[in-house]
Image: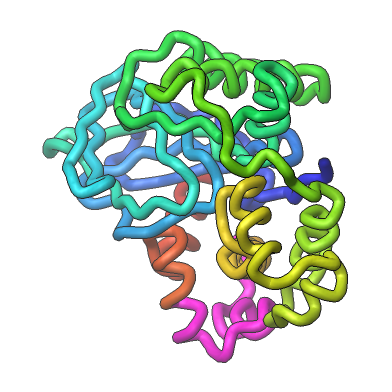
Amino acid sequence: MHTHSSGSGGVGLERSCNEDGSDWLRSTTIFPGVELFEAWFQGSAYRRHRHDTYAIGVTQTGLQAFAYRGATHSSLPGNVVVLHPDEAHDGRAGNEAGFGYRQLYVEPSLILAALRVLRGEGAALPFAREPVTVNKTLAGAIRGAFEGHADPLAGDELVLQLAEGLHEADSGIGRTSTLTRLDLAAVERARQLLDAETSRVVRSDELEAVSGLTRFDLARQFRAVFGASPYRYSVMRRLEAARAQIGLQAPLVDAALSAGFADQAHLTRMFTARFGITPGRYRELRSRGS
């Protein structure tokens, strides 16, 4: 299945520790649907926000803390953190020393496709109930992604390894999906429209026309494949388009209008809700990580 590119600018990831006491971040898309992300923060890192991808990371240094599913969790160096699509969380240092981490953002559709090959057509998206674990399979996959090469076959192997690791972390192993019938071609047509239209709001009747599904059936199947509703998916694609413009130092108001937001204030509200930082803060962190 076709995947969109969710990276934020093709920046390298060679620095893995804090050098001057300043917060920073780096990210790059190595394969379609798989983004590498690396950062270092001291104090508060992100406000409460959501992603439409799996976020699978390893704490590198310090104590990483975050609120997730009604509780506060902490991760030590070597621990694996798994955050599920469309689930609210924040991020901060657990002490004054700060923390660094490496993370993969992975499209749910890739994980589902790999699991259906590995476990059969009834496989569902995995659900790791413990957000902080010691999972050797996932830790090895993350390490390999940061040390490996951008070869398409390596990307296939990485996704399979992540799917296996998430399956291991799923306390409901053996369960099958209650939604075994998926019109993948119809869902993909809807996704392609949302991928293409990142400068405006897409209407429900447009998605119905291109997919051949009712808006409610499409919403149900879309979430099963991509881990988010068509609305959230569309907003994320538009935010990523704005984020790319911000990374190129475009004025914030121009980035907002080019991605179909009403004004700069609208972009700031939506950007903060999805990424946990304001557009201006993101621009600052990217400049420090370059």
Quarter assignment of residue 97: top left
Q: Is residue 77 depicted above or below 94 in this figure?
A: above
- Image coordinates of residue 38 in percent, x first then y, are 47, 36
Q: For the N terminus, which image quadrant?
A: top right
Q: Residue at the spot x=30%, y=51% of the render?
A: 90
**Residue at point 51% right, 78% down?**
267
Total labels: the figure holds 0
Magenta stretch holds residue 258: yes
Identify the residue at image location x=87%, y=69%: 210
The region drawn magenta spans 245-268
Report x, y in % for residue 268.
45, 77
In front of the other: 207 or 2? 207
Q: Given the current orientation, which residue lies at the most extreme left position?
A: 96
- Can residue 22 be seen here? yes
Q: Is residue 245 visible?
A: no
Left or right: 56, with 10 as reference point: left
Q: Is residue 135 left or right of residue 130?
A: right
Q: What is the magenta segment's predominant secondary structure?
A: helix
Q: How is the image coloured?
A: rainbow
- Picture layout, residue 11 above or below residue 137: below
Which residue lies at the image location 68% right of the left edge and 39% below the top edge? 180
Q: Report the front residue among 217 and 226.
A: 217
**Quarter of the image containing the C terminus?**
top right
Q: Position of residue 5 (x, y in %)?
A: 73, 49
Membership of 256 in magenta stretch? yes
Q: Residue 209: give x, y in percent of width and height.
A: 85, 75
Q: Foreground: 1 or 25?
A: 1
Q: Examine the image and state in which quarter residue 133 appears.
A: top left
Indicate the quadrant where residue 253 lies: bottom right
Could you tell whether 139 is left or right of 181 in the image? left
